[in-house]
Image: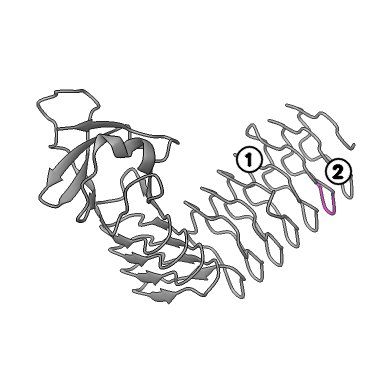
Amino acid sequence: MNNANLTQVNAEGIFLEGADLSNAIVVGADLSNANLGGAILVGANLTGGAQLDNAFIEKSNLAGANFTGANLTNANLKEGAGDNLTNFSNANLTGASLEVGSFIGTNFTNANFTNAKLEKTNFTDAVMVGANMTGVNTVDVVGLTMGSSGNDTLTGTSTKDNIFGLDGNDNLNGGDGADYLDGGNGADILIGGPGQDALFGAAGNDTLTGGGGRDTIHYRSGHGSDRVNGFTLGATGDILSFSGIAAIDVVQSGANTQLRSGNGIAGDTGFGTGAVLMTLINTSFTATHVSTNVSSTNRPIFQFS
């Protein structure tokens, strides 16, 4: 079935154990409860809302496979092997089993791992920005540093780290390397350190310091009022990345810049009265910085006084 086109096919419960599905197009297909144990899914396209809930994908080769947006609820991916081209962005992995797998460099941006089983899995250099780690089991996991329900102090290494504070008022320090820090719930302190770090304060009023390197500060709707120290402006400076924010009013407050929730209407009388999303300390953010220091993905409308 190499290069097969299974777009939108309804194959619930199909038996494909050991099948070669290299480069197969499985966009929007229903493979719920399918048996794909030991299958070769190298380069396969399983996007478009593909349904793989309760699928058996144990010991499968997932190198270069694209599961973006796929539903893998309660799927069994034990001992599966992905690589730096494998993509699980926005995938639903709730309750999935990934134990003893190898996902070195794999992209899990915004993936939902709620209650997933990750014991002894290797996530070295994996991309975990915005991933939901609620209730995960991470005994002996490699490449992830996990906090607890309390107040944690977690420090990274000299290489790339993925550090999740989870609940509590946590203090996360990435150290060297291009790190990802996720504060979770609570009033957290995140320090990226040297390297191109990604900082995600998450829920609560957090304090974020990127440190050296071109860092990205992530903010999602409903994530409190964050304080950002040392934000560098300009073409080689730091980046702000927003999710779920349609419009922002930019208000200068002394030496600081407040980014407030707005309505995108120029000259509106309610300008600058919305909730403070973020304060850039000792930074004067102007209209010229929108193009250089705000991610073009989901870029809000900016209004200036």
Residue 208 visible in the shown view: yes
Q: In which quadrant of the rendered view does residue 270 lie? A: top left
**Residue of label 1:** 70
Expressed as whole percent of the image width and height from the top left, the position of residue 5 reads 82, 28
- Vertically, is 29 above or below 257? above
Which coloring applies here? one colour
Residue 15 disc label: 2
Residue drawn at (43%, 62%) of the image: 181
Q: Residue at x 64, y 57 (%)?
A: 105
C-alpha gap between disc 1 and disc 2: 19 Å
Which secondary structure, mark 2? loop
> Does 37 appear in magenta?
yes
Q: State whether residue 67 is above or below residue 229.
A: above
Q: Nearer the viewer, mark 1 or mark 2?
A: 1
Q: Secondary structure at mark 1?
A: loop
The C terminus lies in quadrant: top left
- Other-residue count near label 2 (Cα within 10 Å), few / some / many at <14 / 14–19 / ≥20: some
Asked if the residue under mark 2 is in contact with the one under mark 1, i.e. CB atoms within 8 Å, the reply is no
Quick check: is 255 in the magenta stretch? no
Position in image of residue 101 (x %, y %): 71, 63
Query: Residues in magenta?
Result: 35-39
Left/right placement of residue 229 relative to residue 20 reads left
Q: Quadrant of residue 90?
A: top right
**Horizontal arrangement in the rendering, residue 300 relative to residue 24 (left or right):** left
Point out which mark residue 118 bears: none
* Disc 1 packing (10 Å; few <14; some 14–19; many ≥20): many
